[in-house]
Amino acid sequence: MALHDSGPPVIRRATDRMGAAVGATVVLALATACTSTPTAAGDESQPSPAGLAAYYGQKPNFGSCEGYGSTPGEKKLYAKPFECARLTVPLDYRDPKGKTIQVAVLRLPAQGDPGQRIGSLVLNPGGPGGSGMTQATTFSTAFAKSPLLQRFDLVGFDPRGVGSSTPAISCFTDQERDRGEDQTTLLASSGKWSEDDTRRLAERCAQGSGGKEILAAVGTRNAARDMDILRSALGDEKLTYAGQSYGTRLGAVYAEMFPKNVRALVLDGVVDPTLENPPRRLTQQTGFQQNFEKLAAA
């Protein structure tokens, strides 16, 4: 099934990791085979939300990636032919005239005939907290011989609070990380946490990141809003997106919030968006155990 620009959004879900990788490859390869068609009547993208026209109208100044990357390894990766830019978005979407923050974006322009270019393919590696910029560099290597890179601009972004975006969330020093003291409540293996432990961690993160208002603004829905501004800034009427793990939740939330702005989604290793945090963690641990047993048997 080809994914035509004028057709309905297509979502592919996969929970088995090997099957997901193959499925994502096939679906995206099919996407590259389609040709651009005029937008059907009544299928226009959603208008930009009130008060945000200036953000939606910005044109990122893509250029050198010097100054991007929060680690030496990233800085080495972010080199030509990749190009980088910063996107300005509101800290609080309820106050678009208030404080702004910067979302870092990396792009590899389509390598093929400009007349055959479809648009941008936006990536998110999950986490939450994974660097989409780094994923774009590794993705480009894995798919170097794929028609994907011929017909799509490959775009990775560091979600607000992450990596090269500013301000970035900072809870621990490098020395604490080296000693293995960067424990949070995110993973079940982190031990027992009381309400006071969690409060102290939140206060520590706020202190290292610019204040509580920064922590309060880094949720999934704001990341989805940023992604819609990114879509517009890239010049795409509709979004073509590939997300992994938590990135599948970001993609699902985007589709819920901006249903008319979706061209196609590939969701690999899907997080069930209907589950609350405790059952979601139990489901994740069950999946880890199942895959460990498959690995041990192999």
Image (spheres, grey):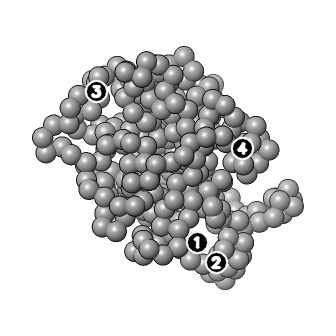
Q: Badges 1 and 2: C-beta atoms under 8 Å apart?
A: yes
Query: Could you tell me the amino acid type at mark 2?
Result: Gly
How many numbered markers are drawn? 4
Query: Could you tell me the amino acid type at mark 1?
Result: Leu
For marks 2 and 3, give the CA distance: 46 Å
Instruction: Kindly report which numbered mark, 2 or 3, lies closer to the viewer in this rendering.
Output: 3
Quarter of the picture holding the N terminus:
top left
Mark 1 Cα-neighbour bin, 10 Å: few <14, some 14–19, many ≥20: some
Q: Is residue 254 above or below residue 206?
A: above
Q: Secondary structure at mark 1?
A: helix
Instruction: Kindly report which numbered mark, 4 or 2, lies closer to the viewer in this rendering.
Output: 4
Q: Residue at x 33, y 51 (%)?
A: 255
For marks 3 and 4, give the CA distance: 34 Å
Q: Which residue is mark 4?
A: 66
- Quick one: label 4 or label 2, which is nearer the N terminus? 4
Q: Does 84 sit left or right of 201 as displayed?
A: left
Q: Badges 1 and 4: C-beta atoms under 8 Å apart?
A: no
Residue 197 seen in this snapshot: no
Mark 2 Cα-neighbour bin, 10 Å: few <14, some 14–19, many ≥20: some
Q: Position of residue 122 (x, y in %)?
A: 47, 41
- Quick one: label 1 or label 4, which is nearer the N terminus? 4
Q: Residue at x 72, y 72 (%)?
A: 208
Q: Which residue is mark 3?
A: 36
Residue sitting farthest toward the bottom: 196
